[in-house]
Image (spheres, helix red, strand yellow):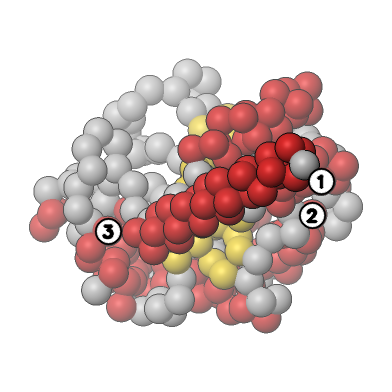
Amino acid sequence: MKKRLCRLSIAPACLLFLTLSLTAQSKLDSLLPVRGFCIDAPRPEGLDSFVQFIDKELAPRRVNTLIVQIDYRYQFKSHPELTDSFALSKGDVRKIVSVCKKNHIRVIPEINLLGHQSWANRTGKLLRVYPQFDETPEIKMPEKYSWPNPENLYCRSYCPLHPDLHPILFAVIDELCDAFESDAFHAGMDEVFYIGDEQCPRCGGRDKAELFAGEVRTIHDHLLQKGRELWIWGDRLLDGKTTGLGEWEASFNNTYRAIDMIPKDVVICDWHYDRADKTAIYFAM
């Protein structure tokens, strides 16, 4: 009899706790539907720590969206020549997906597209394997990188109008999204300095905003066929001169006009280095 009474006394408390928890979660979801975290993909030897970080640190903090910056550090089957150093296997990615599912976290893989095709004096994997895609092949990588420099070289870009580019990109994007079981893909597209270069036989003389918007639409339309969303960083869609944000967190090369040329369902991730400027409001208009 005592056991029965004990069970009856505990059950309402458990129900009350569950109700309060669901109510709190519902309120949080209505206030902050996307609680995102962006992080570099781990090396294979750091995978277990990465999985534990998601489970023990992100999940308790109610993170529900995880962007994993993986680029070409995946063991691609469609284009194995693009597999970079310290690449994760499909089995490795499955562990990330599993812990995200357990904690109801939406996981979105990222490959930097258009810009960020190099870093300092090292060319990225895509342009090392396919140098013909380089927007500015006439600019040589320095032995020792410094900024500023005469060529205004920050990061290289690929030429968005090269006819052989997108079949390769789409193959690796699809493979990566399939591995992550993702309904979205993050294309980066931030800090693009080289676009519409005068010496490019395809892009030279073209409107830089139209070139940027065209690449966004091309990637968006491909993903849409697969039922996936496109996410990008928002800095190239901000006027760096009018806002005073400068050329790093916004655009000095007129790509900001592309904001009126891209599909409205592209998810724009607003970011800043040192302070939370209220530019996200602009993207919500």
Nearest the eye: 42 or 161? 42
Q: Which of marks 2 and 1 is nearer the N terminus?
A: 1
* Element type at mark 1: helix
Residue that numbered label 3 is attached to:
280
Residue that numbered label 2 is attached to:
179
In the picture, the quarter occupied by the C terminus is: bottom left
Which quarter of the figure has residue 32? bottom left
Q: What residue type is labelled 2?
A: Ala
Q: Earlier in the sequence, mark 1 or mark 3?
A: 1
Horizontally, residue 89 falls left or right of residue 185, namely right
Residue that numbered label 1 is attached to:
94
Percent of width and height locating residue 6: 68, 39
Q: Earlier in the sequence, mark 2 or mark 3?
A: 2
Horizontally, residue 144 falls left or right of residue 43, namely left
Horizontally, residue 285 falls left or right of residue 193, namely left
- For image coordinates 25% across by 33% down, the residue present is 274
In the picture, the quarter occupied by the N terminus is: top right
Q: What residue type is labelled 1?
A: Arg
Count of all numbered marks drawn on residues in the image: 3
Q: Which amino acid does label 3 sit on?
A: Ala
- Residue 258 versus residue 243 in the image, above or below: below
* Element type at mark 2: helix
